[in-house]
Amino acid sequence: AKDDYNATVEGNFTVTLTDVFENLSPTNLTPIASLNLPENQPMGTIVGEFNATDPDANATPSKQFEVINTGAINWTDAKAHADASNAVDPFFYRYMATLNSETEHNASIQNLTVNAWLGGNDSSVEGEWRWTEGPEGMANGGSGTPFWNGRSTGSLVGGFFANWASGEPNAYPNENFLWIHNSGVWNDLSDSVSQSMAYQANGYILEKDRIRTVAYSLV
């Protein structure tokens, strides 16, 4: 290598590999191109890119669900809680669950022991139920992804999934937010913590999409 004065410099570098998800560090590290090592740069300066093989690439599921037990909470505060946890996690995209299929629904309720909120509502247009969180929430210019039209006699939109309780949604005044009973059936409820004991939400279901970003450093 040559320094800023065109003098030849020789030296050895140690590349430290860490995997924050699993036990085995990446192997077969190979630079994509020649490394550029300018002098007197601050720590964290990018000097090149590498390819590597990760022995644990398939060890952690790309999608996970977690029941977050917060105690009595309304839908708006549950959304804020999920958004706050997402802001500090560089490895997972976290949001209130959007259950697009029976498979996702069944996975999400494995450890459901409390009534909880889901990431859907019809607060914009009565009867137009949309997933408003996560990737689905960013669809259609940020208005969300429709999954159900109408009341209890309504219909699914676009082949999506729903698991409404009998007679739900009933569009009772101000009941615009998607709630799931600890048995797994859905209901529409108001954005409130003043529900009767049978309907009180005490948390929400968090959906986590893995963001697989691996960083390597020269030290």
Image (spheres, grey):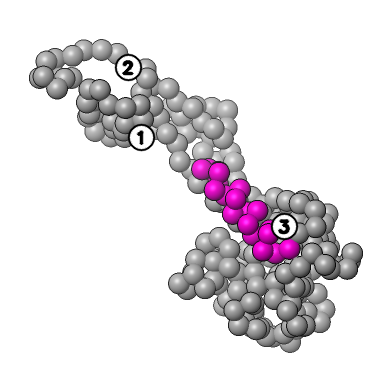
Residue at horizontal 61 percent and vertical 48 percent from the top: 85
Question: Which mark is nearer the camera, 1 or 2?
Answer: 2
Q: Amino acid at mark 2?
A: Phe
Residue lying farthest to the left in this orientation: 6
**First in sequence: mark 2 vs mark 3:** 2
Where residue 94 appears, as percent x and y from the top left, is 59, 52
89 drawn magenta: yes
Q: Which residues are magenta?
A: 74-92
Q: Which residue is mark 1?
A: 51
Q: What distance separates the C-alpha of mark 1 from that of mark 2?
A: 17 Å
Q: What distance separates the C-alpha of mark 2 from that of mark 3?
A: 47 Å
Mark 3 secondary-structure assignment: strand
Question: Which mark is nearer the camera, 2 or 3?
Answer: 3
Viewport quadrant of the N terminus:
top left
Q: Which residue is mark 3?
A: 204
**First in sequence: mark 3 vs mark 1:** 1
The picture quadrant where one finds residue 179 is bottom right
The vertical placement of 56 against 1, above or below, is below
Where residue 18 appears, as percent x and y from the top left, is 49, 27
Residue at horizontal 55 percent and vertical 72 percent from the top: 145
Residue lying farthest to the right in this orientation: 197
